[in-house]
Amino acid sequence: MNRQPTRVMILGASGSIGGTALTALRKYREAFTIVGLSCHTNAEQVLMWADEFKVPNICITGNANCDISGVQPRIYSGTDGLRAMILEVECDVILNGISGSAGMVPSFWALESGRHLALANKESVVMGGPLLFEAARDSGASIIPVDSEHSTIDALIAAHGKESISSVIITASGGPFMSFTTEQMKEVRPADALKHPTWSMGRKISIDSATLANKGLEVIEACYLFNIDPDTVEVVIHPQSIVHSMVRLINGAVYAQMSPPDMSLPIMEAINISTFPLRNVVRPLDFSELNLSFSAWDETRFPMLAYAYQSIKTGGSYPIAFNRANEIAVNLFLEHAISFPAISDIVQHALQADFSHGPSHFEEILVIDRIISEQVEQTISRFIR
């Protein structure tokens, strides 16, 4: 039976998720057609991808880092151009690999278009919350998780049935500082925090992994994605990053998904909406060489995960506050303006304000996010070193 190639648009094509997706897609050119790519400033990289894959549309939302005059693809510009490309270009699935909160609005645009949304931008779920899923229901679109943890949970729930599951278990590599004392963490530099032991990721998510904020965002994301109580989401440290998530059944059994730490698999599973047979996306595990370990996380040294649990349990706009305060703090740390522990101090301080009122519509998310940003900016001077 002849299949029509799945038409894919990739947002954030010059980032870690976009690059991994395009590298993986090289093996499946007969099954996928790339119809659009976006980036913020790295036009040079995106033009190279566009030339290789014969992509007809690209969008550059910021200032291009090269001359784009006279290029072959149609060029969309700015955030208005990104919205236009999402709504105008015919495609089947949109992969949102944009980093940080900047990816939330494009997720809503993708759902507005009625396309399937392969979502690697966890901030869309953390900030959008129930409104994101309401937008999906209104348009008939589906949200397919791309995070390796949530991709695994999605598959395990489908395999075993939600009613048979008592809890989900999200694994965390622990980042580069699992053995550090609180005193040692005071001396951590951005270059140290960017050296993730198992994953190759962007700067922001690498810092989030080092503080366990990334795992906190994933806990919030899991609660919204699967409509589950925070008390049924467990986190365990697993440095090898081979077991991506597990489910604990009501009968006591635990089921897990295992694969190498390679985002190619969850990305390809998410965009493969036509169920094309994907073979050897990642290398098979050699069990003769595996040595897996698991341990509890330390709330004293890594309080960011506890703050994330606090945010989702309290509800309202606290998940938005957690995300925004963390983004501001991470940027300050990368600029050498604050210490590594000050990231969690800034988030803790931000969560002491009253954010019990949750957004009732999409535009209100942006208003609340801006208010939170202004409040955090007014108090960060006390943390600057």
Image (cartoon, grey):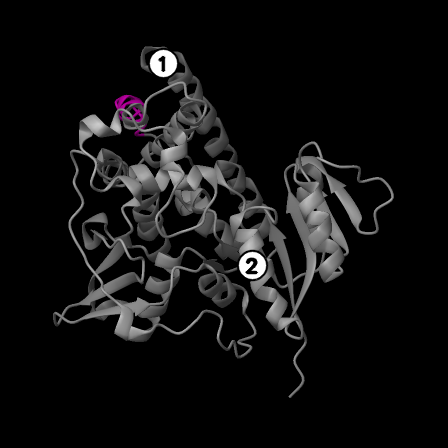
Residue 96, placed above or below residue 277: above
State left or right for residue 278 relative to residue 258.
right
**Along the line of sight, the residue nearer the viewer: 254 or 204:** 204
Q: CA distance from mark 1 to mark 2?
A: 38 Å
Residue 385, placed above or below residue 275: above
Identity, as a three-letter code, of the amino acid under mark 1? Ile
Per the image, label 1 sits on a secondary structure element best described as loop
Residue 355 painted magenta: yes
Residue 287 painted magenta: no
Answer whether labels 1 and 2 touch (C-beta < 8 Å). Answer: no
Question: What percent of the width, then of the height, locates residue 138?
Answer: 52, 54
State left or right for residue 134 relative to residue 70.
left
Does residue 115 show up?
no
In the picture, the disc for residue 201 is none
State left or right for residue 345 relative to residue 15.
left
Question: What percent of the width, then of the height, locates residue 338?
Answer: 36, 20
* Residue of label 2: 21
**Along the line of sight, the residue nearer the viewer: 71 or 10:** 71
Identity, as a three-letter code, of the amino acid under mark 2? Ala
**Along the line of sight, the residue nearer the viewer: 357 or 153:** 153
Question: What percent of the width, then of the height, locates residue 155?
Answer: 36, 69
Residue at left offset 40%, top offset 18%: 337
* Residue of label 1: 384
Question: What percent of the width, then of the height, locates residue 183?
Answer: 19, 26
Extent of the magenta region: 345-356
As drawn, the residue found furthest toward the front would be 289
